[in-house]
Image: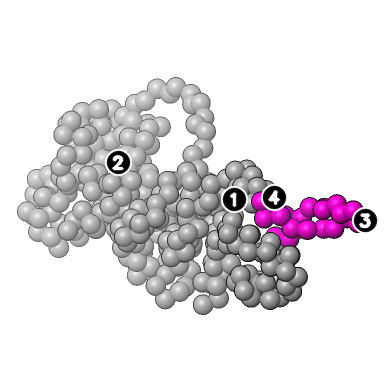
């Protein structure tokens, strides 16, 4: 309740007198009616009446003395001038429910009122969720960033955002890009995979924990619909990575597994370089194809790199994954699955799967 009242204080529209109300005020003042009675009659507080009297004040010269009076025309003229000097009203300020919805999404407010900062939405994603929720008011992303910078919101500031806007691109050195000479290169990956027209093609990587030791996260993202999969591994050995796929293949069966996991794209990390063992099916033959990125070319598996950035929101660098239960990892995977993405037309992987 207090929160809603504070929003009202911040966004309420100031009610100025109309031209007719100013003429009424002028007539009442000439009739020597007390200010308290004028305020009640016109529906304003006394301070507003005093402010209006000051706005329209002028000195009337009589034969023997000067008298301070109120002119409705002068007050209206000054009001009109001030209105032309004022900027456009905030679109967001006229829709408190819309403003609160956006603020709560960007702060990570949950259904039970708790704030989970790990579940904060970006301004663009919050706007997309508002559209899905049916709000009629709309603002663009840049306008929303401007509102945040200008402290339009009660609790939200730039410090609460994951990213503070686009950073200026730095110049980069040209490096010689090479792939592991004995392994299938991404340069030979079929065009239909590059175009993301078919499901079943994944990008994978590892997110390491405290001091690069102990348990790690195997992160996987499907290239077309951005479905995320996260697995906690005891270490970053190639054998641990391989066991994940062995377990999935065993649970899903040969046919379902090969429909869902057609290819894997990864980097040249030592945990992925045992190619023959990685692709070897528990049923015999190859279970999928693997393509390796060029060195120093993380952008070649950009979907996974973007997801890893989001993972670091939840699990910052230095996180000791030995202390993170699998239940929490599953919770975050589900949150990622339902998070809207610009590249998907502001739909989530979960919505595309319906």
**CA separation in Å, label 3 and label 2:** 96 Å
Numbered label attached to residue 266: 2
**Residue closer to the observer: 270 or 142:** 142
Distance of label 3 from label 4 (alpha carbons): 24 Å
In this rendering, would 129 be left or right of 318? Answer: left
Where is the C terminus found, in terms of image quarters?
A: bottom left
Query: Which region of the structure is painted magenta?
Result: 52-74
Residue at image mark 4:
74
| Residue that carries the numbered disc 1 in the rendered image | 150
Secondary structure found at label 3: loop
**Mark 4 against mark 2, which lies toward the viewer?**
4
Q: Is residue 47 magenta?
A: no
Residue at the extreme front of the image, as rendered: 63
Residue nearest the observer in this picture, 245 or 31: 31
Query: How far is disc 3 from disc 1 in space, using C-alphas?
Result: 53 Å
Front in this rendered view, residue 195 or 263: 195
Q: Which residue is mark 3?
A: 64
Q: Tell me, for residue 131, which label it has, or none.
A: none
Q: CA distance from mark 1 to mark 2?
A: 43 Å
How busy is the neighbourhood of tag 4: few (under 14 within 10 Å), some, or many (20 plus)? some
Which of pointers 1 and 4 lies earlier in the amino acid sequence?
A: 4
Q: Secondary structure at mark 4?
A: helix
**Residue located 63% across and 64% down the image:** 24
Label located before the other in sequence (3 or 4) = 3
Q: Residue at x 59, y 50 (%)?
A: 150
In front: label 3 or label 2: 3
Can the viewer see residue 339? Answer: no
Choose the circle earlier in sequence order: 3 or 1: 3
Are the residues at dot 1 and dot 4 in contact (C-beta closer than 8 Å)?
Answer: no
Query: What is the crowding at mark 1: few (fewer than 14 residues within 10 Å), some, or many (at least 20)?
Result: few
Residue 50 percent across, percent down from the top left: 74, 65
């Amino acid at each position: 309740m207090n929160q809603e009242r504070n929003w009202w204080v911040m966004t309420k529209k100031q009610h100025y007198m109309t031209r007719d109300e100013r003429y009424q005020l002028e007539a009442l003042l000439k009739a020597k009616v007390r200010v308290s009675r004028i305020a009640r009659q016109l529906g304003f507080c006394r301070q507003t009446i005093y402010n209006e009297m000051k706005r329209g004040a002028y000195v009337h010269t009589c034969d023997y003395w000067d008298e301070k009076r109120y002119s409705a025309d002068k007050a209206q003229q000054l009001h009109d001038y001030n209105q032309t000097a004022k900027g456009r009203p905030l679109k967001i300020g006229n829709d408190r429910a819309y403003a609160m919805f956006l603020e709560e999404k960007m702060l990570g407010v949950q259904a039970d009122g708790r704030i989970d900062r790990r579940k904060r939405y970006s301004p663009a994603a919050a706007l997309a969720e508002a559209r899905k929720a049916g709000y009629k008011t709309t603002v663009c992303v840049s306008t929303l960033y401007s509102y945040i910078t200008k402290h339009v919101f009660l609790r939200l500031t730039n410090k609460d955002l994951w990213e503070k806007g686009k950073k200026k691109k730095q110049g980069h050195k040209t490096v010689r890009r090479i792939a592991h000479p004995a392994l299938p290169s991404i340069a030979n990956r079929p065009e239909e995979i590059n175009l993301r027209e078919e499901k079943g093609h994944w990008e994978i990587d590892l997110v390491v924990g405290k001091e690069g030791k102990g348990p790690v996260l195997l992160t996987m993202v499907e290239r077309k619909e951005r479905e995320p999969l996260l697995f906690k591994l005891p270490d970053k050995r190639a054998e641990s990575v391989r066991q994940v796929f062995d377990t999935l293949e065993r649970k899903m069966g040969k046919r379902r597994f090969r429909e869902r996991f057609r290819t894997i794209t990864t980097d040249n990390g030592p945990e992925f370089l045992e190619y023959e063992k990685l692709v070897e099916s528990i049923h015999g033959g190859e279970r999928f194809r693997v393509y390796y990125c060029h060195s120093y070319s993380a952008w070649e598996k950009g979907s996974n790199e973007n997801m890893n950035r989001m993972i670091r929101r939840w699990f910052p660098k230095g996180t000791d994954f030995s202390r993170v239960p699998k239940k929490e990892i599953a919770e975050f995977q589900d949150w990622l699955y339902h998070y809207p993405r610009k590249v998907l037309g502001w739909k989530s992987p979960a919505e595309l799967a319906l």
